[in-house]
Amino acid sequence: MRDITTGVQIVMPQHCNGYRRPRLFGGQIMAWIDVIGAVAARRYTGCAVTTVCIDNLTFLKPAFLNDTIVQEAAVTWTGRTSLEVRVDSMVERLDGSRELINRAYVVFVALGADDRPTPVTPYQPQTEEEQTEFRNACVRRQVRLSMQA
């Protein structure tokens, strides 16, 4: 995907539970997801944004104390005033290899100077991967809309 926003964190004691081998709190990674997703959305729209929902959040594997977490965020879909951002969270090993531990899809609304929703530039997927993400985002949107009825 193009226009990827990247963030890096080291899992510190305050980010972990008190288990025998301290694991990263799910809520902590959710906060990091929200921040990097918002940065990607702000860069795309050139506006302030607000989180509407985390549409899909999948915990694939744990992260532990002292792990390096790399997150990559990119826009996958836009509506009139909203946009979806995919955030992948990976543990980066000391040898530089990465393992996906979490994937989330976050929906934001762009806000104008009056703090009201404002139109965004339509997203135009270019690559096969971007087109697949875009189609899947349209399906997720339809599911969200059907749940509101």
Image (cartoon, rainbow, N blue to C red):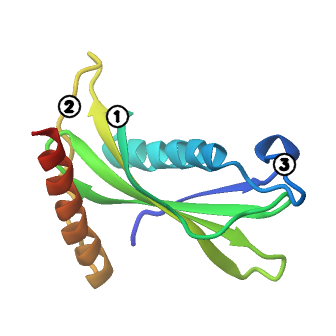
Q: Mark 2 points at which residue?
A: 118
* Residue 43 x %, y %: 41, 46
| Label 3 Cα crowd, 10 Å radius (few <14 / some 14-19 / many 20+) | some
Taking the view exactly as shown, the residue that stands out farthest to the left is 149
In the depicted structure, whether residue 96 falls above or below residue 144: below
| Label 1 Cα crowd, 10 Å radius (few <14 / some 14-19 / many 20+) | some
Q: Which of marks 3 and 1 is in front?
A: 3
Q: Earlier in the sequence, mark 2 or mark 3?
A: 3
Q: In which quarter of the image is the C terminus?
A: top left
Q: Which of marks 2 and 1 is nearer the N terminus?
A: 1
Q: Mark 1 points at which residue?
A: 47
Inter-mark Cα distance, 3 to 1: 32 Å
Inter-mark Cα distance, 2 to 1: 9 Å
Q: In which quarter of the image is residue 94?
A: bottom right
In the depicted structure, whether residue 116 falls above or below residue 71: above
Q: Identify the residue shown where x is 35% and y is 49%.
A: 44
